[in-house]
Structure formats: structure tokens, C-alpha cells
Image (cartoon, helix red, strand yellow):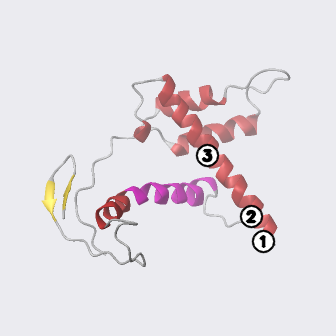
Amino acid sequence: MTLTTRAATRESGYRLVTTILDPRQAPAEALVRLYHRRWKIETAYCELESQILGGRVLRGRHPGAVAQETWALLVCYQVLRTAISDVTLQDSLADPHRLSFSIALRTARDQVIHAQGILAGATVDWVGHIGAAVLAEPLPAKRRRTRVRVG
């Protein structure tokens, strides 16, 4: 199978282990391409564990509390990702891959801790504060992965 990236074209073989027996249900080439996309969800898990939780474990002592805490973490993550996404809609030059999740999280925490911008009856512009912060400190451009993973 030949896979083409922007950086290079190379001939390589992949060994695919799956329980799917019907190739029409999930063609091998599509599954190989999905492998590369899976790293985005791995990044999300890492952001939940290391950034939002800061290495701490969930505090719930029974399944219902753990489920509630998990949903709260997922909501926080989605709100921050939505704010970052909204920045790219307002600023066409902003590269979404270079906008930092940790800066967005730190800015949101600072606003909550200091109760900045909280006035009775006023509209709080979360995206404005978070957006300004992530645009002020963009991440370096990411290089494309073209090497075969060895594991």
C-alpha cells in the first residue's frame, strides 16, 4: 500500500489486526488512515489528565460521583476547545493547531478565581479573554510526522 503525505510518498506495509472479518465494512486502507487521526483523541486524553486534572486522580468515592466528575471534566474540556475554535472563526489568520490549550485553561481559571469580568446583569466575554490570551502566545508550528513508528 502506498501512503502519500505532503512531505513524502513511501511504499510501506502495515500489519492490521482486527476482529472485523468483512473488508467492505472497514477497508484496510481506511483503517490505516484512521490510525494517524487517532492521535488527536490521545492529545485530548493527555490534556484531560495532565492539564485539567494536573496529575490528580478523580475524587469520587462511588460510581455515580466518578461519572459526574468525568462529565464535568469533559464539559470543561469542550468549553475550552470551543472557545479556541471560536477564536479561529473571528481571526482568519489564527492557526488552530498553534493555539495553546494550557493557556486557554490558565486564562479561564484566572477569570474564575479572580471573578474577573463578573458583574450582575453583564455579559461575560469568555472567548474574548481566552482568545486574546491564546493569540498572544501561539505555539511553534508543528512538523509533520513522516517516520514509521517503531514499537
Q: Are marks 2 and 1 in contact (CB under 8 Å)?
A: yes
Badge 1 element: helix
Q: Position of residue 28 (x, y in %)?
A: 31, 67
**Relative to residue 148, is residue 126 depicted above or below?**
above
Q: Which residue is pictured at 39% across the width and 77% down the height?
A: 21
Q: Amino acid at mark 2?
A: Ala
Apparent side of residue 11 relative to residue 39 in the rendered image (left or right) = left
Numbered badge on residue 105: none
Badge 3 element: helix
Quadrant of the rendering where the C terminus is positioned = bottom left
**Prevailing SS of the magenta stretch:** helix
**Relative to residue 105, is residue 49 depicted above or below?**
below
Q: Which residue is mark 1?
A: 63
Q: Amino acid at mark 3?
A: Gln
| Mark 3 → mark 2, Cα distance in angstroms | 16 Å
Q: Which residue is mark 2?
A: 67
Extreme residue toward the top, this view: 122
Q: Which residue is pictured at 43% across the width and 35% down the height?
A: 138
Q: Amino acid at mark 1?
A: Pro
Quadrant of the rendering where the N terminus is positioned = bottom left
Q: Position of residue 58 (x, y in %)?
A: 71, 66
Front residue of 57/63: it is 63
Apparent side of residue 48 relative to residue 57 in the rendered image (left or right) = left
Numbered badge on residue 78: 3
Q: Which residue is pictured at 23% across the width and 65% down the height?
A: 148
Badge 2 element: helix
| Mark 2 → mark 1, Cα distance in angstroms | 6 Å
The stretch in magenta equals 37-52
Image quadrant in which you'd find residue 142 = top left
Q: Position of residue 73 (x, y in %)?
A: 67, 54
Q: Which residue is pictured at 54% across the width and 59% down the height?
A: 45
Apparent side of residue 137 relative to residue 78 in the rendered image (left or right) = left
